[in-house]
Image: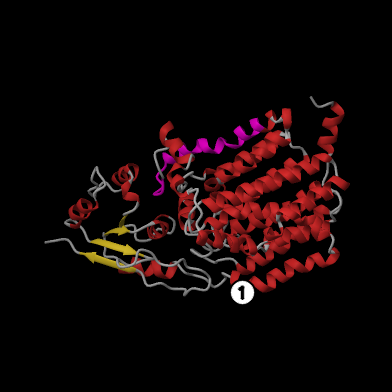
Amino acid sequence: MMTPAALHRQATETIPAGYGRAALAAVMVALGIYLLTIAPDLTWANASPDGVELITASATLGIAHPPGYPTYIVLAKLFSLLPVGTVAFRYNLFSALATSLTVGLVVLIIGFLHARVRPMTAAAAALLFGFAPLVWSQALVAEIYPLNLLLLALFLLAWSRNNTSIWVGIWLGLAITTHPTSFFFLPLLLIGGGRRAGRSMAGILIGLLPLLLLPILAAGDSPIIWGRPTGLAGWWWLVSGQLYGANLRPDIDWAHSRSLLQALMLGPSLIVTTGNIRLFVARTANDEAAGRRLKIILLGLAGLLYVGFAFFYRTPDAAVLLLPALLIAALLIAPILERGGRAALVLPLLLVVVTFSARDLSDVRDVRPSAEMMLELAPANALLLTPGDRTIFTILYFQHVEGRRLDLRVADANLFAFDWYREQLRSQYPDIFVPEADDLLAFEHNNGQERPFCRASLVSRPDASAAPAITAGDPAFVVPYIDCRQPSP
């Protein structure tokens, strides 16, 4: 049990001198660059195909794909009420602000983690993180990763000050609700906290409470509600993310590995090799307390867990799973940057100059023109069958966020395989026929006799399984595909 004197020291502990100003400066620099390059509207750029779904689910207080992301849904909804730009832009702005605040927190964490790193060097390390292409790319679009990074940074700040505080657990629990891989930081509490880790573990349970919002959100009228979280089995199916278990494969895919290595090389995490970790530990052993040395080792362990998971998780956008590893890298490279003195500030500046044009999304409008053309071409009162997430959620955005073409009925061929989805279609559209089984032929045949039935896609045609991901360098407009059959007389 802590003595009164220890409690007083903990309560009066302040940010190391100079680090507050350095953190604020880093936040302003990062935010300024992000605002120059932020996407102005809906976009699928920068590996953010889930962005339109997240925007629509949050704006209508629904439930996104597993694990549901209730913390993001609620916080982003509040932020979206700002009277600035389009609704989609406000969600992009939420990402930019969350990422820039994370950059500032990295400065403060370095101040507590390393005894002999100056504020200027800490700011350089934080800005290297903020302008790493992978981090920068996510700061410009609507995604859950910026909020996850912010909550992880708050967790690491609390942990670097006192690894047994209940707030350490609360921040980690909240981070887990924004992405389940945040569990990889659990060893920091279990090992670093020792016998007093109980308070932190109790804090995690408090931080996980937003997951209890899922049954409440499911009772609303949002067009995006994944699963049946109103019951325990359905709730667990959602929060456990078991739908994506098949993506985790123990074999080695060299093409996948090369793409991840490329992502790592474009950020400061390339510096974090085994030799450099040994250098960090040796340096810490010489001039810092044993507690700090253990924290650096535990951070390295968490970073390796993230890298290992990303290598065995097979999705096209698996590189974004490396974002927390880049955050850890920024914390670990600070002592090395200290050797460079003021020259360390040149590194993030060079990174901005070299990669600015590739990151710039300020003129990218790759979704709205195509979607608007599709909505214009669709016959009145038609039923649209879509081939996947991008098309279905984009149409739902225009209908339920911007109030356009509410006469259309829309269903997705991929989601149709889920019993809960067909049940939701019956509730949402009581005037159309939805079979009990996964039978798209019966769905098309019966509804095609009553109204125009259209196969519609924003990303692919019937003779192409998928279109390439749209990035800042791709054309700003993709001609949508829509093929409609009028009802028989």
For the point 80% across and 43% down, which residue is it? 292
Q: Quadrant of the N terminus?
A: top right
Q: Quadrant of the C terminus?
A: bottom left
Work out whether residue 22 can be spotted.
no
Quadrant in which residue 193 is drawn: top right
Work out whether residue 255 can be spotted.
yes
Drawn side of residue 395 relative to residue 454, left or right:
right
- Coordinates of residue 60 in the picture (x, y in percent): 45, 49
For label 1, the crowd category at 10 Å Cα-Cα, with few meaning under 14, some 14 to 19 and many 20 or more, is: few
- Coordinates of residue 51 in the picture (x, y in percent): 49, 57
The amino acid sitting under disc 1 is Ser
- Would you place residue 135 above or below residue 70 in this image? below
Magenta includes 207? yes
- Farthest residue in the top direction? 1
The stretch of residues the image draws in magenta is 201-225
- Coordinates of residue 385 in the picture (x, y in percent): 30, 58
Drawn side of residue 148 relative to residue 73, left or right:
right
Quadrant in which residue 354 is drawn: bottom right
- Would you place residue 281 above or below residue 379 in this image? above
For the point 47% across and 75% down, which residue is it? 475
Query: Would you say the magenta stretch is mainly helix, strand or loop?
Result: helix
Magenta includes 33? no
Total numbered badges shown on the rendered structure = 1
- Coordinates of residue 361 in the picture (x, y in percent): 56, 69
According to the picture, the residue beneath numbered tag 1 turns out to be 357
Q: How is the model colour-coded? A: secondary structure
Quadrant in which residue 355 is drawn: bottom right
- Would you place residue 31 above or below residue 325 in this image? below
Dot 1: element = helix
For the point 37% across and 57% down, which residue is it? 388
Drawn side of residue 6 relative to residue 276, left or right:
right
